Structure formats: structure tokens, C-alpha cells
Amino acid sequence: MVSPARDTIAAIATPPGRGGIAIVRVSGPAAPAIVRAVTGRAPVPRRAVFSRFRDATGEPLDEGLVVYFPAPASFTGEDVVEFQGHGSPVICDLLLARLLELGTRLAEPGEFSLRAFLNDRIDLVQAEAIADLVASRSVQAARAALRSLDGEFSRQVHALVAALTRVRVYVEAAIDFPDEELDFLDDAALREGLAGVQRRFDALAAAVRQGRLLAEGFSVVIAGPPNAGKSSLLNALAGSDAAIVTPVAGTTRDILREQILIGGMPLNIVDTAGLRDTSDVVEREGVRRARGELARADHALLVVDGSTTDDAECAALRAELPEGLAYTLVLNKLDLGHPPGLEPRCANTVAVSALTGAGLEGLRTALAEAAGLGEDATTTITARRRHLDALARARGHLDEGLHQLEAFRAGELLAEELRLAQVELGAVTGEVTSDDLLGEIFSSFCIGK
């Protein structure tokens, strides 16, 4: 674990460009002295004080507000000062240069949030929620990030750890006192405790999955044979001519990406080359990339020409999808009609016309349901892929422990698997983590955060 630094850092905390106000933030033990050097007066805790900002010769650089937050009751847990001046890039650079002259150093990406984490002002989940809040692309995503920042995600993880700990204590006590002759398989309290842990895992995993989709977007790949109208469908969903559309088969050869919102959920729509065997080198590369996108997708729109495709072709195309990938079969070209009996016999089917717009609302509804928008949005928390992975590993240890218990009555192995599950959960909130993971997480933050 990295120790909290004792140097003082500074950074511009507002976006680059011109604006009415810009903020330069300072954190560290030298912050009060820096206020005196820049403004000529001592900082006043928790009050916005109008001041002139001066350079080393006493010449004014700008004027604005100075707000001082003494340690430990600040965002970082250190002495923090914010200089709020005019939003000119030139003025901001001059003020930052003055702060560097006074002994501060330029903050690294996410270093303010990292110091808040290291000083126990926030946990790792809350730190990530700050970045997710800044990057929110919808109202729902912002609200989910705020819930995580408020500690809702962390509370659920801690409740799960507490339930896991109670079971561990019970199991290890039985191991330490074998004279009690506890039958692990028949003990009702143990079985109920394990069942309760499983229910908590399931509920948290569902909330985290939904939060990850809100933060990162629901990845939808449009796939299918050439000339099925995939690019036309992308244009219709995006509401713009994002993709080139021609009657020539194989027009799309590279990956095209658009982002749309459905019910507040960001959808990352990817148009791909038509799936077919081809001798064209460029088109073959496009098909290879299409399959790569499908392997990473959350959902696929399998688009076919509904006016000519039969059931056998639908089945063959479904076989092209990666195993386990959810999909919606889109019968395009509704304006041209469909072969009799095709639609009812194909599951997960929506009939549309990308040309006229008919059926698009039904497709949007299907996508919303696939993304889980029917779930209670008031309980959604923001989350990331690493949270999903850690929960999956923790659940894997729990399941392995149950297997060892039921198959071999191995209480010691159950206890060990429960301990490993607890370690994985500790990695979610940062109670158990590594310097490499911290570097990876905070390097994606803004400089001023």
C-alpha cells in the first residue's frame, strides 16, 4: 500500500478552455503558507475570502475567491486550498506556475482522489464513483454514481462481508471444537447462513451488472449477412447518416460506432461487415473484426433481409454467434413483406423497416428490456468491470466451498474458500489491494481530481 505523500500538489481542477470561473486546487502541508505567499494574508478556514493573487514581485495575476479547508476535514484529508479566479487559460497557467515556484508539484491524474483514499476519507468504490460521476452520460448514470459516492455500494459489500464472516466464525468454531460432533450437512443454521450469503451475492451481482452498463454503456453489435440493411438500421437508430449505404454487397468493411440513449441507458451500437466467406482481402479482415466485436458484445442484433430469408438461414446465422451471447433477430425490410410463417417460428424476433422507420419503437423496447431497464433504477449503483470480476471470483470461492462441503464433508476446505471469498470482496472497496491496481484505477482520472 502506498503511504500518503507529504509533499504539496497543485492542479487546475476545471476543464480546459475559457469560462467565467476557473479553479486551481492545492493539497498538502504547505497549503496555508502558499495562501499567505500568493494573497498576502493568512487563510480563513471554510470561508470564501476575496483576494488578489500576486506573483513573486507583487504584481497582480488575478483576483477571486480563496477557500481553505484545514485537515483532516477536507476532501483529501490534508490542508486544501482552492483559488477561484477568472476562466482564462493564460491566467490559470500563470497562477499554476506561481504555485509551482512556491514548492508545489503538479498533481498526477487522480492524485487528489488517491490521497482521499489513502487518508481514509473515501474507499476505493467511492473514488471510482467520482470518476464515473464526472463521466456520466445520462441522468440515470449520474444518479447511480451519486449513490455509490454516498457509500451505498460499499455498504452492500460490507453487509455481504459481514454475512460471510458470520458463517466463517460458525464453521471455524465447529472445526476448533470437534467434540461437539457438528454435522455440517445437516446443521440448519449453517445451511441458512450459506443460503443467505448466496442471496446477497445474487442481489449485489445484479445491481453491479446494471451499474456497469450505466457507466460503460450497453454494447450492441449489428451483425448479419451482406445487404441485409445493417448500416441502414444503424443510421435509423442513430438518427443520422453515420454509415454509407449502397446496394453493393460488402459496402461496410470496417467497424462503425455510434452511441445512442434509450430510456437513459447509453447504448454503444457497432455496425460490422457482413458475415460471409469471401476472397476479398479487405472484406475478409472486416469479417474477422466483426467476429471480434461479437465476442466482446453484451447483445447482438442479428439483421436479415426479412423479405427473402427463410428459417434455415436464420438458424445458420444464429450458429455464427458466440456461445451464450444474447441476441435479437431483426427481420429488416418490412416494407417488402416477409415469407409466410417466418416471423412466428423465429424466437426473439422484431420486424422493422430501416427505410420507413416501421417497427423501430418495438426494437428500441426490445433493446431496453435486454439492457435491464425494467429493473428498479432507484437502487442501481455505478460499477465497473473489475467489480463484476471480483464478485465472480468471490462467488466462485463460495461455490467451491459448498462443493467441498457437500461432496467430502470438508469443513476445513469450506472455511478456506470462505476466507478467499472475503479477500476478493476486500479488493472491491480497497481494503485488500495492490499498488499496481491503484495506479491503474487513478491514472484514468482527471488531473484536478
Image (cartoon, rainbow, N blue to C red):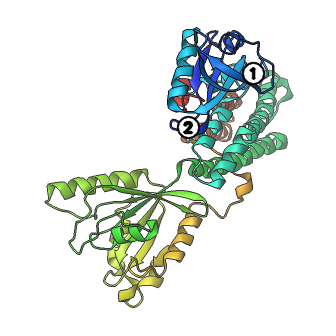
For label 2, the residue is 386
Task: Name the foreground residue: 272 vs 415.
Answer: 272
Q: Position of residue 303 (x, y in %)?
A: 38, 71
Compared to 230, does 40 lie above or below?
A: above
Q: Position of residue 300 (x, y in %)?
A: 44, 62
Task: Name the foreground residue: 98 vs 104.
Answer: 98
Task: Name the foreground residue: 278 vs 9.
Answer: 9
Instruction: Estimate the spatial distance between the alpha carbons at disc 2 and disc 1, rounded to whole Å.
Output: 36 Å
Q: Is residue 218 left or right of residue 51?
A: left
Residue 158 placement: quadrant: top right
Residue at the outermost front position = 59
Residue 190 placement: quadrant: top right
Helix, strand, or loop for circle 1? strand
What's the mark number on residue 155? none
Task: Name the foreground residue: 340 vs 58.
Answer: 58
Q: If you read the primary sequence from the N terminus, does the residue marked by circle 2 or circle 1 appear first?
A: 1
Helix, strand, or loop for circle 2? helix
Q: Does the image show residue 396?
A: no
Q: Position of residue 333 (x, y in %)?
A: 37, 81
Give the class, few, some or many, for how many residues have Cα within 10 Å of label 1's Cα (few <14, many ≥20).
Answer: many
For label 1, the residue is 68
At a point 61% along the width and 10% down the height, the residue shown is 7
At a point 79% along the width and 34% down the height, the residue shown is 162
Q: Position of residue 389 (x, y in %)?
A: 56, 39
Compared to 33, does 337 lie above or below?
A: below
Compared to 420, does 192 lie above or below?
A: below
**Which image quarter is the C terminus in?**
top right
- Amino acid, disc 1: Tyr
Q: Is residue 136 left or right of residue 229?
A: right
At a point 67% along the width and 40% down the height, the residue shown is 402
